[in-house]
Amino acid sequence: MAFDSSSAPAFTLHGVRRSFGAKRVLDGVDLSVPQGQFLAIVGKSGCGKSTLLRLLAGLDRPDAGRIEIGRSGDGAGQAPGTRIMFQEPRLLPWERVEDNVAVGLTGIATGPEARARARAYLAEVGLSDRAGDWPAVLSGGQRQRVALARALVGQPGILALDEPLGALDALTRIEMQRLLERIWREKGFTAVLVTHDVAEAVVLADRVVVLEEGRIALDLAIDLPRPRRHGSAEAAALEQTILDRLLGRDG
Amino acid sequence: MTVVSTEPEAAVAVPAERPRLRLSPGAGRGLLGWALPAVTLLAWEGLARAGAISANVLPAPSAVLAAGWELALSGELARHIAASSGRALAGFAIGGGAGFAFGLANGLSARSRALTDTSLQMLRNIPHLALIPLVILWFGIGEEAKIFLVALGVFFPIYVNTLLGIQGTDPQLVEMGRIYGMGPRALFVRVILPGALPAIFTGLRYGLGIMWLTLIVAETIAAKSGLGYMAMQAREFMQLDVVVLSILIYAALGKLADSLARGLESATLSWHPAFQRPAATGRRAR
């Protein structure tokens, strides 16, 4: 397992609530995530998983409860706490790929240093040769890789992923899952992946949390050796457990 | 967009013949655009020489050219062109600058928009050329009258399109910029303004067209110099060649202004898929 559960938590949620109008989207969520863990949050549409991620990334505030973000590593103290990656790559169409990655260094590095670091992360996602291209000429998967490089170039302690692979075709998706797993194991950041794809959650995560009606309905450790493969028997059994939980109440 | 789009050609071409068409790149297509004007000029010259067109109706291109040469030698042509261009540029700078400033302010600030947009939209519906009698009463026939009219005409297309461009900013990109710690200045320079540029250029080119149109009308009605004045003087003396000459110069100046704007546009918008030449799009990924 890639994390030590005795290490300090990367972040902790204490009784977090969030409502939009009359609808209570998060209804008292308690969750503690150790540093370096890969957490997946699954749930049906509208279960509050994206809201949870936005709260974690500081894009929104809880109505009640607390979110504690731990000190990230022993870095120079300049590292940003949390970065978020969306389903859309959200690249600036008028800046070249390399400059788009350097957006992730806003307030951290500029000029040649930013350029060098951006290039290093582009190499990490396998796009060194596209540094000078416009985003418009890249494929969907390549754009999402650029967005990943941009999110990671500032070396965040936590990477929040809001269904980042949702819009990709099946094969590109598996490629991206492998890339994400490899980079996560190399860099050791804490990853929080929101997805509606149970198979994706099981193949990537150390731990899967099922959200249901704004609460945690299931908290399951995925103790499979890495790198993982799609379709192993143990993975299938875990997927079934999660799916039963997700669909059980409908039947 | 009218610029460097290969789509219509690709749509007509039979797939097997496409490589042959590709052999004549942008330059060939540019020349093709001049074929029709050239043929027209030759036919016009031929018909005039054969006597099919009376010199009292339309002088031959060679006669127009000769008149132009004569005026150029006397320095009169340069003086009129300078007077017209000066007015055009001054009016454009004032009206375009103000339109751009109001467009930015109203696009970025809801309060500013609430304050001024309704008034501006009401003013926009007054045809600016209808103000000519009023403008003559205010300013006489001096320079101010013409510059005022040009500025007024140019203001609205630039205002409306700048506002539209800024309002069309992708909120997801703005959110992204904020997440990555961009301040208001960086957000404007790196996210909002570049996104608004295509619309601003549309306004710019439209404004340039209105600029010449307004100037022609204003100079024809009340002026003591400029191309419009030259044409009206020539009419008094039945110098049809000079009248035609001034019309052609207006056309050439308009085309020049538009070409400059287009050049600027394709230089600044090279990231935009519509402005990428086939060589660049050839690398398009799977």
Image: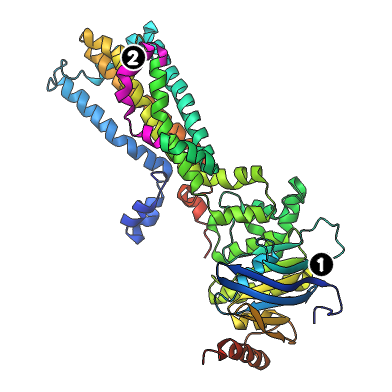
Image coordinates of residue B277 in percent, x first then y, are 47, 48
Image coordinates of residue B43 in percent, x first then y, are 20, 28
* Residue A106 belongs to magenta span: no
Image coordinates of residue B111 in percent, x first then y, are 53, 41
Q: Is residue B65 above or below residue B108?
A: above
Q: Amino acid at mark 2?
A: Ile
The residue located at (33%, 9%) in the rendering is B70
The residue where tag 2 is placed is B136
State the extent of the magenta-drawn residues as a range: B120-144
Q: Is residue B12 above or below residue B67?
A: below
Whether labels 1 and 2 share one chain: no
How many residues crowd around disc 1 within 10 Å: few (fewer than 14), some, or many (20 or more)? some
Distance from disc 1 to disc 2, alpha carbons, whole Å, reads 73 Å
Q: Is residue A56 above or below residue A27?
A: above
How many discs mark residues in the rendered view? 2
- Judging depth in this view, the residue of B254 and B184 nearest the camera is B184
